[in-house]
Amino acid sequence: MAYIERLSHMALKTVDLEKSVEFYTKVIGLTLHSRGKVGDAPLVVLVEGIGLTTGGPGAGHATVVDHFAFKVPDLGPVVERLKAVGAMIVDGPRPSPYGNSVYFLDPDGNKVECHDGERA
Protein backbone atom coordinates (compact mmCIF):
# COMPACT_ATOMS: atom_id res chain seq x y z
CA MET A 1 0.00 0.00 0.00
CA ALA A 2 1.34 3.43 -0.98
CA TYR A 3 1.28 6.00 1.79
CA ILE A 4 2.46 8.85 -0.40
CA GLU A 5 -0.09 10.30 -2.80
CA ARG A 6 2.10 12.69 -4.87
CA LEU A 7 4.82 15.30 -4.63
CA SER A 8 3.30 18.35 -2.95
CA HIS A 9 5.95 21.00 -3.58
CA MET A 10 9.67 21.68 -3.77
CA ALA A 11 11.42 24.59 -2.07
CA LEU A 12 14.48 26.01 -3.78
CA LYS A 13 17.04 28.31 -2.21
CA THR A 14 18.11 31.00 -4.68
CA VAL A 15 21.02 33.40 -4.86
CA ASP A 16 18.91 36.14 -6.54
CA LEU A 17 15.24 35.68 -5.65
CA GLU A 18 13.80 38.14 -8.17
CA LYS A 19 15.91 36.73 -11.00
CA SER A 20 14.58 33.26 -10.18
CA VAL A 21 10.99 34.50 -9.93
CA GLU A 22 11.34 36.10 -13.36
CA PHE A 23 12.85 32.90 -14.81
CA TYR A 24 10.16 30.59 -13.48
CA THR A 25 7.25 32.90 -14.34
CA LYS A 26 8.30 34.67 -17.53
CA VAL A 27 10.60 32.11 -19.15
CA ILE A 28 8.93 28.78 -18.41
CA GLY A 29 5.47 30.15 -17.66
CA LEU A 30 4.73 29.16 -14.06
CA THR A 31 2.20 31.22 -12.11
CA LEU A 32 2.83 33.35 -9.03
CA HIS A 33 0.60 32.26 -6.14
CA SER A 34 1.82 34.38 -3.23
CA ARG A 35 4.67 36.21 -1.56
CA GLY A 36 5.41 35.94 2.13
CA LYS A 37 8.08 34.85 4.57
CA VAL A 38 9.37 31.62 6.01
CA GLY A 39 11.00 32.67 9.27
CA ASP A 40 12.97 35.79 8.37
CA ALA A 41 13.51 34.79 4.73
CA PRO A 42 11.31 35.91 1.84
CA LEU A 43 9.21 33.19 0.20
CA VAL A 44 7.62 33.20 -3.24
CA VAL A 45 5.14 30.38 -3.88
CA LEU A 46 4.27 29.33 -7.42
CA VAL A 47 0.98 27.58 -8.23
CA GLU A 48 2.75 24.60 -9.78
CA GLY A 49 4.45 23.52 -6.56
CA ILE A 50 7.73 25.42 -6.44
CA GLY A 51 8.63 27.62 -3.48
CA LEU A 52 11.50 30.07 -3.94
CA THR A 53 13.46 31.58 -1.06
CA THR A 54 16.92 32.97 -0.45
CA GLY A 55 19.77 30.80 0.70
CA GLY A 56 22.54 33.18 1.61
CA PRO A 57 26.20 32.82 0.60
CA GLY A 58 27.00 29.63 -1.28
CA ALA A 59 23.39 28.84 -2.19
CA GLY A 60 22.91 27.35 -5.61
CA HIS A 61 26.41 25.89 -5.88
CA ALA A 62 25.71 22.36 -4.67
CA THR A 63 22.60 20.27 -4.93
CA VAL A 64 21.54 16.76 -4.02
CA VAL A 65 18.58 16.77 -6.43
CA ASP A 66 19.45 15.62 -9.96
CA HIS A 67 16.49 17.43 -11.54
CA PHE A 68 12.76 18.04 -11.32
CA ALA A 69 10.28 18.01 -14.18
CA PHE A 70 7.15 19.69 -15.47
CA LYS A 71 4.74 18.15 -17.96
CA VAL A 72 3.81 20.61 -20.70
CA PRO A 73 1.20 20.33 -23.45
CA ASP A 74 3.67 21.43 -26.17
CA LEU A 75 7.45 21.41 -25.81
CA GLY A 76 8.09 23.76 -28.76
CA PRO A 77 7.15 27.05 -27.09
CA VAL A 78 9.18 26.16 -23.99
CA VAL A 79 12.31 25.50 -26.06
CA GLU A 80 11.76 28.75 -28.01
CA ARG A 81 11.53 30.79 -24.78
CA LEU A 82 14.62 29.10 -23.33
CA LYS A 83 16.63 29.91 -26.47
CA ALA A 84 15.27 33.47 -26.63
CA VAL A 85 16.57 34.29 -23.14
CA GLY A 86 19.84 32.41 -23.55
CA ALA A 87 19.05 29.76 -20.93
CA MET A 88 21.57 26.93 -20.68
CA ILE A 89 20.02 23.88 -22.37
CA VAL A 90 22.00 20.85 -21.20
CA ASP A 91 20.17 18.09 -23.12
CA GLY A 92 17.50 17.85 -25.79
CA PRO A 93 14.97 18.32 -26.93
CA ARG A 94 14.99 14.56 -27.44
CA PRO A 95 12.84 11.46 -26.99
CA SER A 96 12.69 10.23 -23.39
CA PRO A 97 10.60 7.83 -21.30
CA TYR A 98 8.23 10.80 -20.80
CA GLY A 99 7.68 11.74 -24.47
CA ASN A 100 10.01 14.45 -25.71
CA SER A 101 12.14 16.19 -23.07
CA VAL A 102 14.40 19.19 -22.74
CA TYR A 103 16.73 19.69 -19.76
CA PHE A 104 17.98 23.15 -18.81
CA LEU A 105 19.47 25.08 -15.90
CA ASP A 106 17.67 27.71 -13.85
CA PRO A 107 19.54 30.84 -12.67
CA ASP A 108 20.99 28.93 -9.69
CA GLY A 109 22.16 25.92 -11.71
CA ASN A 110 19.29 23.56 -10.79
CA LYS A 111 18.53 21.14 -13.62
CA VAL A 112 14.91 21.31 -14.78
CA GLU A 113 13.13 19.08 -17.28
CA CYS A 114 10.05 19.86 -19.33
CA HIS A 115 8.39 16.98 -21.18
CA ASP A 116 5.32 16.62 -23.37
CA GLY A 117 4.16 13.07 -22.69
CA GLU A 118 3.24 10.64 -19.96
CA ARG A 119 5.57 8.11 -18.37
CA ALA A 120 5.97 5.09 -20.61
Image (cartoon, rainbow, N blue to C red):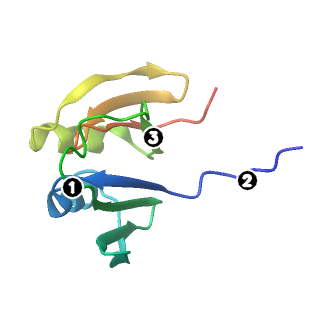
Quadrant in the picture for residue 55: bottom left
Residue 28 placement (x, y as % from top left): 28, 51
Q: Which residue is mark 1?
A: 56
Camera-side mark, 2 or 1 = 1
Q: Is residue 16 left or right of residue 10?
A: left
Question: Is disc 2 surrounded by few (<14), some (14 to 19) or many (20+) residues within 10 Å?
Answer: few
Q: Secondary structure at mark 1?
A: loop
How much space separates mark 2 and mark 1, taking CA atoms?
32 Å
Labels 3 and 2: the sequence-earlier one = 2
Labels 1 and 3: the sequence-earlier one = 1
At x 36%, y 35%, the residue is 63
Q: Amino acid at mark 1?
A: Gly
Q: Which residue is mark 3?
A: 69
Quadrant in the picture for residue 17: bottom left
At x 16%, y 64%, the residue is 18
Quadrant in the picture for residue 54: bottom left
* Tags 3 and 2 touching, CB below 8 Å: no
